[in-house]
Image (cartoon, helix red, strand yellow):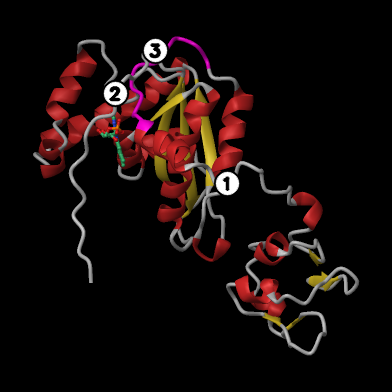
């Protein structure tokens, strides 16, 4: 089956598919013939689906992105400025969670939304690990603390920068400054050699964090866990990621105990205009 087919009855020859194709593999002549693919299309196509998604007439089909798996855009798109402002400015790192487990279906929904994050060359390298329950999460936090103790003992500058001695003391007093007693951890991981995977994982987790409140949930980056995951062999072993994979971001997830009522000020943007 060819990569791309055009229904010549419905195609209006408006050239939109060729115009939006990032790889410029769709050719279009203004002589009234339908668009066609160049000989290098199979090799170059990144299956981003732009050609299928932009066609207002549904004239295009793509083997890797068939139109029947591309639902129509919602009528409420684009969101209003107010809605986006509320979404972005209202996001908060949630560090105090209710003692309520997160339903796997909700985590799945969030991950499905995060899958719409952009990735270089549409490679979609992000894979996910979900760890639920204190009986699994607390040992992970404990391994992070063990790693911190080793950095403190070695007088590592990292220990000072991130106030690790204080964090360890908190842990020893029965608190959990590492995973914040979140009922769920979401790890975005990818193959070590996947290009720009760290960026893709960061963007995907950012999507997940932004989407969490619409599902009644709150999230917070677990920077300590992620840093330790790639520097502490016992923690990496405990996470048991697929071989040759690295953790590129960890997020705590759970039902927030508190509601926020104000939006803290940020630094004024520093912009160079040219
Ligand atoms: C990469 C990254 C790592 C972070 N790691 C932690 C962490 O380990 N523990 C924590 O409580 N907060 C962590 N945070 C949350 C930041 O402290 C938080 O984003 C910042 O204070 C601003 O607050 P806000 O997110 O509520 O706007 C992290 C944030 C980022 C972006």
Q: Nearer the viewer, residue 156 or 133?
A: 133
Real-space Cα separation, disc 1 to disc 3, in angstroms = 27 Å
- Left or right: where does residue 10 sit relative to residue 138? right
Where in the image, quadrant-wise, is ligand 1 located?
top left
Near-viewer residue (136 or 272): 272
Residue mark closest to the camera, 2 vs 1: 2
Q: Is residue 133 visible?
A: yes
- Percent across and percent down for residue 76 are 61, 41
Quadrant where the C terminus is found in the figure: bottom left
Q: Which residue is mark 2?
A: 262
Place of residue 84 in the rendered image (x, y in percent of width and height, measured from the top left) = 45, 40
Q: What residue lies at 63% left-to-right and 62% top-to-bottom?
A: 48
User: Measuring 18% from the left and 43% from the top, which residue is drawn there?
Assistant: 267
Q: Is residue 145 left or right of residue 241?
A: left
Asked if disc 2 and disc 1 are in contact, CB closer than 8 Å, the reply is no
Q: Eyeballing the image, is 72 above or below 228?
A: below
Q: Which mark is residue 115?
A: 1
User: In this rendering, would 105 be left or right of 198?
Assistant: right
Q: Which region is colored magenta?
A: 90-101
Residue at left offset 21%, top offset 34%: 265
């Amino acid at each position: 089956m060819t990569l791309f087919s055009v229904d010549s009855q419905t195609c209006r020859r408006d050239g939109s598919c060729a115009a939006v194709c990032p790889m410029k593999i769709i050719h279009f002549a203004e002589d009234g013939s339908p668009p066609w693919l160049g000989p290098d299309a199979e090799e170059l196509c990144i299956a981003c689906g732009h050609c299928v998604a932009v066609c207002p007439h549904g004239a295009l089909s793509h083997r890797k992105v068939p139109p029947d798996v591309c639902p129509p855009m919602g009528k409420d798109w684009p969101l209003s400025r107010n809605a986006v402002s509320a979404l972005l400015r209202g996001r908060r790192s949630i560090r105090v969670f209710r003692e309520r487990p997160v339903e796997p279906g909700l985590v799945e929904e969030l991950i499905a939304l995060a899958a719409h994050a952009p990735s270089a060359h549409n490679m979609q390298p992000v894979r996910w690990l979900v760890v639920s329950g204190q009986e699994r999460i607390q040992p992970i936090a404990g391994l992070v603390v063990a790693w911190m103790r080793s950095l403190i003992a070695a007088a590592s500058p990292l220990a000072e920068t991130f106030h690790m001695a204080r964090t360890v003391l908190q842990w020893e007093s029965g608190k959990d400054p590492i995973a914040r007693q979140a009922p769920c951890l979401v790890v975005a991981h990818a193959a070590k050699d996947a290009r720009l995977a760290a960026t893709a994982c960061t963007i995907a987790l950012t999507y997940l964090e932004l989407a969490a409140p619409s599902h009644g949930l709150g999230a917070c980056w677990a920077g300590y866990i992620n840093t330790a995951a790639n520097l502490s062999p016992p923690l990496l072993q405990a996470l048991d990621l697929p071989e040759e994979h690295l953790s590129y971001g960890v997020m705590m997830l759970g039902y927030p105990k508190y509601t926020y009522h104000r939006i803290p000020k940020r630094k004024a943007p520093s912009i160079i205009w040219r």
